[in-house]
């Protein structure tokens, strides 16, 4: 594991706060990466194996994502060690304890991420008030319910089609991680005529070359069942989803799932990064050399944080989807055009774009870095 100082550079992290309260089994970390554009927004991730390093890398991804999306927010991320499926009373105690411990960390606004949801954010609101991603009943815009990130991904894909080239109506897609992001991007793509041929969750992969019924899969997940309970398909190991031949491969689960060791197994025309940091830079280079288009995470999956930032500004739910569509289409086009014109990786084009927006904000600060 990398030491936190070895991850530091000219952009951050600004603050790293570790939290421990053994009496309730609370162990977590907050990384505020950069606040030049405003208070940081980034989700609280809950997982048994989450690390400070993962949290710091995710916080950096939020810095770039928020800058690229033109939001008045910096990047941060919080991580809580624990099984997100623990008994709800225990989870509530941990989330409330974590929020209280971070009461003074005013440059961080809590938001949901893997393992946490709107209910968790309602507990945070009750304790410290500084939170987005609340239930509708509390004035929130439930980004996972409306599918803000999945909607943004589908808009990025529409633009990317012209660079591939592909037609949405005949595209076959694969989704690793059929959760909040995975379900909604599948729904939006199917509505445009594309066909889901494999999806996975932590139980395994379900595959049917003739197409899966996305609504049926969503109904299964709503009942709390795994995708492998779907009947009209072949059940495969979770990892086998990497080998499925398709047009669009969408990682929507954990970090670093595609790396130098397995990138050669992908057989796709486009990789669209729904998850945060799902692919290593070395693997992205290999995709580029093979002519496979890869749309970086902090460009493609910005829908959720755009929604969260709009909730923070008290915008209406109706305005959210059109704003996401407009920002995602514009940024994806700019990144892919630059990448093509300069023969560089889309990630490098995206980083240059985000960095220049960030450095402009940093130039107005008394301490140039933050
Ligand atoms: P989620 O918890 O709702 O869903 C994650 C899904 O991934 C679950 O179905 C889980 O079973 C599955 N999964 C876990 N490990 C897996 C594995 N090894 N193989 C296959 N499936 C696996 O989470 P989410 O909100 O959909 O987030 C997914 C990813 O997208 C995360 O990286 C998150 O940071 C990122 N993201 C989410 C949002 C958002 O709006 N929710 C926004 C931007 C980025």
Image (cartoon, grey):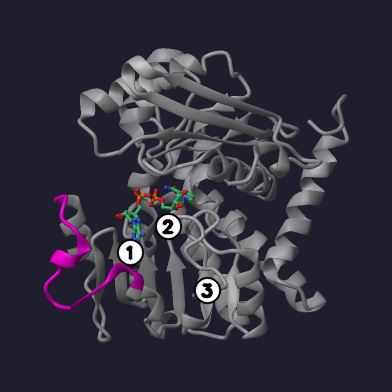
**Disc 1 designates what residue?**
187
Across and down, in percent, residue 190 comes to 33, 71
Q: Which residues are magenta?
A: 223-239
Is residue 232 a member of the stretch shown in magenta? yes
Give the spatial CA distance, label 3 vs label 1.
Answer: 31 Å
- Between discs 2 and 3, the one toward the N terminus: 2
In the image, is the residue at mark 2 within 8 Å of ligand 1 by its beta carbon? yes
Across and down, in percent, residue 101 comes to 48, 15
Q: Nearer the viewer, mark 2 or mark 3?
A: 3
**Label 2, residues with CA under 10 Å away: few <14, some 14-19, many ≥20:** many
* Label 1: which secondary element: helix
Tell me which corner region of the image, top left, top right, bottom left or bottom right, holds residue 143. top left
- Name the residue located 21 percent from the left edge and 63 percent from the top edge: 227
- Between discs 3 and 1, the one toward the N terminus: 1
Tell me the tag on residue 261. Answer: 3
Q: Are marks 2 and 3 in contact (CB under 8 Å)?
A: no
Front residue (pair 188, 224): 224
Tell me the tag on residue 150. Answer: 2
**Label 3, residues with CA under 10 Å away: few <14, some 14-19, many ≥20:** few
* Label 2: which secondary element: helix
């Amino acid at each position: 594991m990398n030491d936190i100082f070895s991850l530091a550079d000219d952009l951050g992290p600004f603050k790293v706060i570790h939290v421990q309260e053994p009496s309730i089994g609370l162990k977590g970390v907050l990384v505020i990466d950069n606040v030049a554009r405003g208070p940081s927004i980034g989700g609280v991730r809950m997982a048994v194996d989450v690390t400070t390093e993962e949290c710091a890398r995710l916080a950096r991804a939020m810095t770039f994502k928020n800058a690229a999306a033109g939001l008045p927010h910096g990047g941060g991320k919080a991580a809580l060690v624990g099984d997100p499926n623990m008994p709800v009373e225990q989870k509530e105690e941990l989330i409330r304890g974590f929020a209280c411990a971070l009461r003074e960390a005013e440059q961080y606004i809590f938001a949901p991420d893997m393992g946490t949801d709107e209910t968790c954010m309602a507990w945070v609101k009750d304790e410290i008030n500084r939170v987005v991603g609340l239930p509708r009943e509390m004035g929130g815009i439930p980004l996972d319910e409306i599918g803000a990130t999945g909607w943004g991904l589908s808009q990025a894909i529409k633009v990317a089609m012209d660079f591939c080239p592909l037609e949405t109506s005949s595209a076959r897609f694969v989704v690793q991680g059929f959760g909040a992001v995975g379900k909604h991007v599948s729904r939006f793509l199917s509505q445009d005529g594309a066909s889901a041929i494999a999806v996975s969750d932590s139980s395994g992969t379900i595959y049917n070359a003739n197409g899966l019924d996305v609504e049926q899969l969503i109904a299964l997940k709503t009942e709390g069942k795994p995708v492998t309970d779907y009947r009209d398909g072949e059940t495969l190991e979770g990892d086998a989803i990497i080998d499925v031949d398709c047009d669009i491969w969408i990682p929507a689960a954990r970090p670093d799932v595609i790396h130098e060791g397995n990138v050669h197994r992908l057989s796709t025309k486009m990789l669209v990064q729904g998850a945060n940091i799902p692919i290593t830079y070395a693997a992205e280079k290999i995709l580029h050399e093979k002519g496979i288009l890869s749309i970086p995470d902090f460009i493609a999956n910005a829908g959720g944080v755009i929604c969260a930032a709009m909730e923070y500004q008290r915008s209406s739910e109706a305005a959210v989807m059109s704003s996401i569509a407009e920002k995602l289409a514009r940024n994806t086009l700019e990144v892919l055009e630059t990448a093509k014109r300069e023969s560089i990786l889309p990630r490098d084009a995206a980083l240059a774009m985000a960095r220049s927006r960030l450095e402009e904000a940093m130039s107005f600060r008394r301490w140039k870095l933050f």
